[in-house]
Image (cartoon, helix red, strand yellow):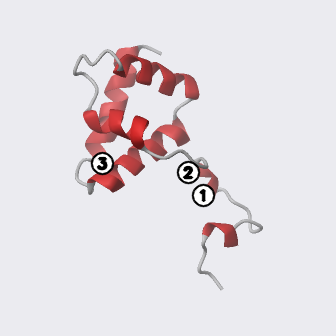
Amino acid sequence: MDIEKLIRMANQIASFFRSYPEAQALKGIHDHLVAFWTPSMRRALLSHAGQDDGKLDPLVLKAMVDAPSGRNPIEKEVAGPETVGELGSDAG
């Protein structure tokens, strides 16, 4: 995928989360990139970020570099009943 398109898409994600408190915005951006972007898309964007040409929103860069890695955020949405307790459900 073209790097300019990746930058544009990433900046749109950052634009959506800009009104959130920074910690929530960074987590939201990071979770979105992990859940919906392929590893090769994330690697390409991170590789380009090292060039510091000012095109990539600083929130995106910070979310990619500083956000803690963990389980894919989409997993909690598709978890079966055997893992619901693990995810902190307050049901029942």
Q: Residues within 10 Å of mark 3 (few under 14, many from 20)?
A: some
Pointer 2: what residue?
Answer: 73
Gap in Å between the C-alphas at discs 2 and 1? Answer: 8 Å
> Is residue 60 rendered to the left or right of residue 78?
left
Between disc 3 and disc 2, whose residue precedes? 3
Left or right of residue 44: residue 56? left
Pointer 3 residue: 17
Q: Secondary structure at mark 2?
A: helix
Numbered disc total: 3
Type of residue at label 1? Glu
CA distance for labels 1 and 3:
20 Å
Amino acid residing under circle 2 = Pro
Q: Which residue is mark 1?
A: 77
Element assignment for label 3: helix
Q: Place residue 2 in its image quadrant.
A: top left
Q: Residue at x 38, y 40 (%)?
A: 63
| Lower sequence index among marks 1 and 3 | 3
Residue drawn at x 69%, y 59% as measured from the top left: 79
Q: CA distance from mark 3 to mark 2?
A: 16 Å
Q: Are marks 2 and 1 in contact (CB under 8 Å)?
A: yes
Residue drawn at the location 24% of the way across and 16% of the way down: 53
- Check the picture and name the quadrant holding the C terminus: bottom right
Residue 91, position as x, y percentages in the image: 62, 81
